[in-house]
Amino acid sequence: MDMTVQLSRTEKGQDEIFNLGHTLRPRQRQILFSIGNGISFGDLRGKLPNCTELGTMLNELLQDGYIQALHDDMAIEAPGQVIVPGNPAPSSAPAQPMTNLEASRGYVLEFLATLVGTKSPAYRQMSEVQDMASFNKVLPMCRKVVAAVASPRQAAEMEAEATKRLAG
């Protein structure tokens, strides 16, 4: 099992997270949310240590075009099967490297979309962030919204992860 395979959501996966019509089971959506804009299989396994069916669900998400592997020459082994990445939803444009601000902003937007939806003022303001000053101004408001809708613990985790992604 190659723990270094990099996974990312496809456009179909983005639509599943950000639009209101959900077609996946909750556990699959959790995995899709955890993948975000990119994560290695090893890091994903670390985030979801109790998910015994992770390999199987990743295989389904790959086959259904919700996620893609960023390296075609790697494979993930699932119980009884091998996933050969690279077939689902090939990108027509070369991938541009993401800045730490973009990664952090994207993470917060995904978190907000999942918990409060894309129509909230917090989501709108975070989606308009273009620089560090505005990000630092909007992040506390996003934390308050998450704390009110979900829990203070989830809000603190969101803020900590966003700060970690800023640092690189």
Image (cartoon, rainbow, N blue to C red):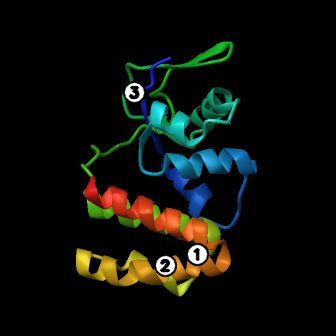
Could you say whether the residue bearing mark 2 is in a helix, strand or loop? helix
Per the image, label 3 sits on a secondary structure element best described as loop
Residue under the image location 56 percent in, 52 percent down: 33
Q: CA distance from mark 1 to mark 3?
A: 32 Å
Which one is earlier in the sequence, the residue at label 1 or at label 3? 3
Report the residue marked by disc 3.
4
Front one among 76 and 96: 76
At 44% across and 28% down in the image, what residue appears?
86
Q: Residues within 10 Å of mark 1 (few under 14, many from 20)?
A: many
Identify residue type, mark 3: Thr
- Mark 2 crowdedness (10 Å alpha carbons): few <14, some 14-19, many ≥20: many
Q: Nearer the viewer, residue 10 or 123?
A: 123
Q: Which residue is mark 1?
A: 146
Q: Is residue 77 visible?
A: yes
Q: Earlier in the sequence, mark 3 or mark 2?
A: 3
Q: Residue 17 in the image: state x and y as whole percent.
A: 59, 59
Vertical relation: 73 (above or below) 121: above
Q: Amino acid at mark 1?
A: Val
Q: Which residue is mark 2?
A: 142
Residue at left 59%, top 67%?
Answer: 153
Q: CA distance from mark 2 to mark 1?
A: 6 Å
| Tag 3 and tag 2, C-beta contact below 8 Å | no
